[in-house]
Image (cartoon, grey):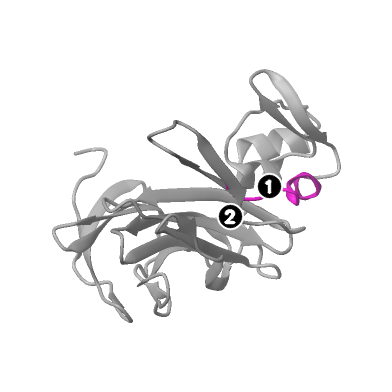
Amino acid sequence: TLVKALKANGMTILTTSHLLADAEDICDRVMIVNHGKTVAEDSSGLADMIQGMEIAVGVRDSDTGTWTCQNLTDNDVVDMAPHLKMAANGSAAVVWMRNPGNGIAGTKDAPSDLMMAFYRNGAWSEVKTVVPQAGVVTAYDVAYDGSNFCLAYALDDDGDISTRDDEEIWSVSGTASRWGEPKRLTTDEVEDSRPYVWHANGAVQMAWLHDQKLMTGTLNAGMDEFASTNLFAAISPAG
């Protein structure tokens, strides 16, 4: 990339990003800033800073306005980037990424796990490893209707996030107690990334980027199977 080329020529570059994978890939020194104040700084690498990152949740009592907060994780590896989805019945599902090697997206030698927990009947479930050793995960999203979930995620096949042509979409679906095996939804020679999923009309809908074009499709989900049929192009930036 241009930034890496300038860096290789000895230029000092100041960059900002909310994409931790990019920061890990590019930067020699990282600072985390919150409301204009430096809250963490490290020159030895991002991995040393993020191993203390945990997943915390809070539930608000609508009658009293008070919050009840708790940690879902407490360990010495990175748990990060939670995605929370609420259902109409008041239950919820949260998915996040865990990396035992304290990397951001993961590597071939230290693949990331995809973790989930469920909020039902006023309490959070135990943490569940839905996709162990998923690989180099670049993006993910979850749909949840109060009973069934669908988790879609993008994997970089060769583990090198600077080459995106081998990035493909995978998914897994099920309930809080049972889910199927991951299914590969895309197989091509262009980038498929940034999936977004939701329930509608009794099925799971998915939108994603295919070679920088916006795609959408209907996924037929079952308890143990996840069919990747009926994926179709909807719109492109040029259209």
How crowded is the residue under tag 2: few (<14 C-alpha within 10 Å), some, or many (20+)?
A: many
Measured from the top left, where is residue 110 in percent x and y?
69, 67
Label 1: which secondary element: helix
Instruction: Specify start and end residues of the magenta stretch as a single range.
Output: 46-56
Marking on residue 25: 1
Disc 1 marks a residue whose amino acid type is Asp
At a point 55% along the width and 66% down the height, the residue shown is 126
Q: Quadrant of residue 201?
A: bottom left
Check if mark 1's residue and mark 2's residue have beta carbons within 8 Å: yes
Q: Is residue 52 magenta?
A: yes
User: Of 198 and 106, which appears nearest the observer?
Assistant: 198
As drawn, 139 above or below 111: above
* CA distance separating discs 1 and 2: 8 Å
Marking on residue 161: 2
Marking on residue 222: none
How crowded is the residue under tag 1: few (<14 C-alpha within 10 Å), some, or many (20+)?
A: some
The answer to which of marks 1 and 2 sits earlier in the sequence is 1
User: Is residue 14 visible to us here?
Assistant: yes
Residue at the outermost right position: 44
Number of numbered discs visible in the structure rendering? 2
Label 2: which secondary element: loop
User: Is residue 164 visible to us here?
Assistant: no
